[in-house]
């Protein structure tokens, strides 16, 4: 008998279902559990990153991090460690498949329905693990659950209760998967060095222009800002390359536009080669940021 019966990917901020597995269970108890899962999804933002709820003969498990949450309906015989391991595997696969911008802009339910094939494959794998694989592969997450038990959410009818058991949500933070970026490349290091150089040049020129402007004319104010804004944008590009950030694509485009517009405004103070150098470094850095993806999750659980 399968222990993981249904899985769903939802957006945390509003509970919008992004994808879900196809199921063939039509029992009244299961349909009621599906309805309760949908109601719980609407309030995930109020709960910690890892939790569970009991519903009739089933258990609902959820794991959320960032703007994406994975939820599952499991039989009561399903170990909690197995359920959370399954949800974490789904979370990593979904984040690796879809950009955060696409997730944020999704406006209709099940916008990523094609991910159902991945859910079904992962669900089948976990449901057909041998007992030896399960025992050896889930030890790490079992230790995590002992140290930091998941929240237990109370379901009342079709609505989710406002609090957890005992009335309040615990203050501990979510045990979300670590967002680790792929290793820095040699070209990435070069882009960082050039970006810092461009930021320093812009800052020095901007400060120098400000110091020699006792009574600043309107056009000189524009020139000063045209030096300072690209300088800040260059530092922001360095940060975006080194650290993961939600809506990264949108931020990269904003920084790139700031640098390009600032250098275009400085056409009278910089020659063509200087402008091409600054804009070229900005494009190189943007490319390095967008091509440096999240590191593939490690197979910690042997599944």
Image (tube, rainbow, N blue to C red):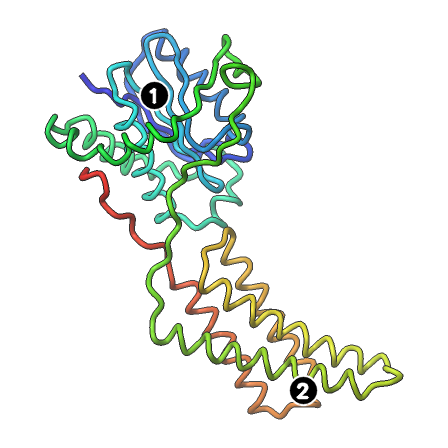
Check the image and report above or below for 168 versus 196: above
Q: What residue is rendered at 28% in x and 21% in y? A: 5
Residue 267 shows which numbered tag?
2
As drawn, 281 above or below 255: below
Q: Say which residue label 1 marks.
A: 73
Image position of 124 with respect to 111: above or below: above
How busy is the neighbourhood of tag 2: few (under 14 within 10 Å), some, or many (20 plus)?
few
Query: What secondary structure is found at the residue carrying circle 1?
Result: strand
- Report helix, strand or loop for mark 2: loop
Image marks 1 and 2: residues in contact by CB distance under 8 Å: no
**Residue in the foreground of this view, choosing between 155 and 219:** 155
x and y percent of residue 167 in the render?
A: 56, 16
| Quarter occupied by residue 303 | top left
Q: Position of residue 292 (x, y in %)?
A: 38, 62
Tell me the crowding category of disc 1: few under 14, some 14 to 19, or many 20 or more residues within 10 angstroms, Cα based. Answer: many
x and y percentages locating residue 146 in the rendered image: 33, 27
């Amino acid at each position: 008998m399968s222990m993981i019966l249904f899985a769903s990917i939802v957006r945390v901020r509003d509970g919008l279902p992004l994808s879900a597995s196809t199921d063939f269970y039509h029992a009244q108890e299961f349909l009621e559990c599906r309805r309760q899962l949908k109601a719980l999804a609407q309030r995930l933002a109020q709960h910690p990153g890892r939790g569970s709820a009991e519903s009739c003969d089933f258990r609902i498990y959820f794991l959320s991090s960032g703007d994406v949450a994975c939820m599952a309906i499991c039989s009561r015989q399903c170990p909690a460690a197995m359920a959370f391991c399954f949800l974490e595997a789904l979370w990593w696969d979904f984040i690796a498949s879809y950009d955060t911008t696409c997730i944020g802009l999704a406006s209709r339910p099940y916008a990523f329905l094609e991910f159902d094939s991945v859910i079904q494959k992962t669900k089948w794998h976990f449901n057909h693990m041998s007992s030896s694989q399960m025992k050896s592969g889930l030890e790490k997450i079992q230790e995590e659950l002992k140290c930091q038990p998941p929240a237990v959410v109370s379901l009342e009818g079709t609505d989710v209760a406002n609090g957890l058991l005992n009335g309040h949500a615990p203050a501990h933070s979510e045990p979300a998967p670590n967002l680790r970026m792929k290793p820095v490349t040699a070209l990435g290091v070069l882009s960082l060095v050039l970006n810092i150089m461009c930021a320093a040049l812009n800052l020095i020129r901007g400060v120098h222009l400000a110091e020699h402007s006792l009574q600043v004319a309107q056009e000189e104010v524009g020139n000063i800002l045209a030096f300072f804004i690209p300088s800040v944008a260059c530092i922001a590009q360095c940060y975006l390359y080194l650290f993961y950030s939600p809506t990264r694509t949108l931020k990269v485009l904003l920084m790139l536009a700031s640098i390009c517009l600032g250098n275009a405004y400085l056409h009278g103070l910089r020659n063509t080669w200087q402008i091409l150098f600054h804009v070229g470094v900005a494009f190189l850095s943007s490319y390095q940021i967008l091509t440096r993806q999240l590191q593939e999750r490690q197979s910690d659980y042997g599944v």
